[in-house]
Amino acid sequence: MNHDNVDLDAVVVGAGFSGLYQLYCLREKLKLRVKVLEAGGGVGGTWYWNRYPGARCDSESHTYCYYFDRLLLEEWSWSERYPGQAEILRYLNFCARKLNLEKDIHFNERVLESEWDSDARLWHVKTQTGKTFRARFLITAVGCLSSTNMPDIDGLADFEGEVYHTGQWPHNKVEFDKKTVVIIGTGSTGIQAIPEIARQAKKLYVLQRTPNYSVPARNRPLSKDFHSAFIKEIDAWRSKMLKSRHGHPWTAPDRQVRKTAPEKRQNIMEAAWERGGLGFRESFDDVLLNEESNKIMSDFIRQKIVDTVHNAETAKKLLPIDHPFGTKRPPIDTNYFETFNCDHVHLIDVRENPISSIFTNGVTLSNNTQIRANMIVFATGFDAMTGALQKMNLKGRGGLKLEDAWYAGPRTFLGLAVPEFPNMFTITGPGSPSVLTNMPRAIEQHVDWITDILSHAIQCDYVEIEASQAAANEWTQHVTDVANKTLLPKANHSWYLGANVPGKPRVFMPYAFGLNHYRNHCDSVTANGYAGFLLTK
């Protein structure tokens, strides 16, 4: 075999939560020849790249892990309610070692192009090292939040200080001490990074376009006996997560904000605020369905901001008013709003006074104010859901480019398969619940389903599996219809809609009806002989 050409049954792209579990299933359950191609130097996916200060998960640690292997759950003990980046990365390395996965992962192997060969019925996957991997099946495990969104600002190349993007943070320690730092962006990432940078920097300028809601995380170390109690209740935790729409171990009680007596609902929200975390939104079941209910909860959070931030003018700038609570990714934080009470932290509204350019020593605003800085940190998020897929230069039947197939927005069947791209499956792709869930629950469901359809294809001698155009059209319309029954599309600058990336089509990408309902759809497709797929003998 030519050293530069490798023949396989399957290629998996990405070695995060998705890729590791998919490798395990294909190798151990289906006994396939499979390799994972990973651009980074180690496992971890989003947790390999996102090392910025304060990087932390917003799902509780004992739920943000694999549940397919009981021994992994028993042997790994989490230290905090919400795990930080370093701990999650250690966990994924632990899993890779335990399951002996690394021998089948090619690190530092970025995919440059992936093309379907209709004659040979194989995928040709080319990497930056000059290798070509040929495989019957291609599975993308590239993550929803892995393609960084770097704004195009005049003069950025002239800046003489340090420049970082939170999604491509260096592995060596970044020093903020005695430095003046500008951070651009106040989404989930900025909300996590700002308090940490503020603790060390001499001065911090926060450049905010869109004020954001945020709920305190109330993170804390887990008690010594937490793990032993958890092991006894694994099945109960799993059951709770499978029943819920978000893959978290709770479901919203059957009550509406607007129909609950004012004093009672105030008490409910106060108690949920003190508990902290994403469960706050699930105090009622109509927060994303009814504008009046959402306004009551949004007003509650806005009042908390006013109560927390001492300077009235700063507090006013921090009040989110252009979108309902929960329609953008709902951040949870540790001392975010409190940070603006520090004398060395300055908030600048760049909607009112936009960035005009960057010069050698800092940032110039449209009113000609110059902010001198030693460092600029971009917390400007990701080309979410589709960006990482499109960077693979995927070409399907007849050389059709994925970006051309998706010129009006992504079109998939179940978020798992794309018409004209045979034998290719996407883990947590657009059109699946993905980013609206506790990701490992969505990932395990997807990987199990993909493993089953590949097993079916192999047993029945199908040479090609492909989503039909009709099934993809119908599913994509269903995803849109479901989103439109909620308040989710009302967020103007949401990456759920692709609205944070100039020129990207405005389409609501994740499936909003819940992981529980979505699972039923997938099971129904399987029960009906993979209806919606074209299966070729």
Image: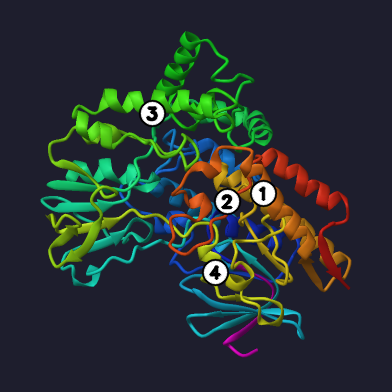
Q: Is residue 135 left or right of residue 272?
A: right
The residue under label 4 is 390
- Tags 3 and 2 touching, CB below 8 Å: no
Q: Amino acid at mark 4?
A: Gln
Instruction: Tell me where the magenta segment starts and ends, as one range.
Output: 1-12
The CA distance from mark 1 to mark 4 is 21 Å
Quick one: label 2 or label 1, which is nearer the N terminus?
Answer: 1
Q: Quadrant of residue 314?
A: top left
| Mark nearer the viewer, 4 or 2 | 2
Q: Is residue 123 left or right of residue 48?
A: right
Question: Could you tell me what secondary structure mostly forms the magenta stretch?
Answer: strand
Q: Is residue 319 left or right of residue 417?
A: left
Residue sitting at 65 percent across and 39 percent down?
514
The residue under label 1 is 479
Q: Amino acid at mark 2?
A: Phe
The CA distance from mark 1 to mark 3 is 34 Å
Q: Relative to the observer, which residue lies in front, 173 or 167?
A: 167
Residue 508: which disc?
A: 2
Asked whether the viewer can see residue 265, the reply is yes
Q: Secondary structure at mark 4?
A: helix
Q: Relative to the observer, which residue lies in front, 298 or 517?
A: 298
Mark 4, residues whose alpha carbon is within 10 Å: few (<14), some, or many (≥20)? some
The CA distance from mark 4 to mark 3 is 37 Å
Q: Secondary structure at mark 1?
A: helix
Q: Secondary structure at mark 3?
A: loop
Q: Quadrant of residue 122?
A: bottom right
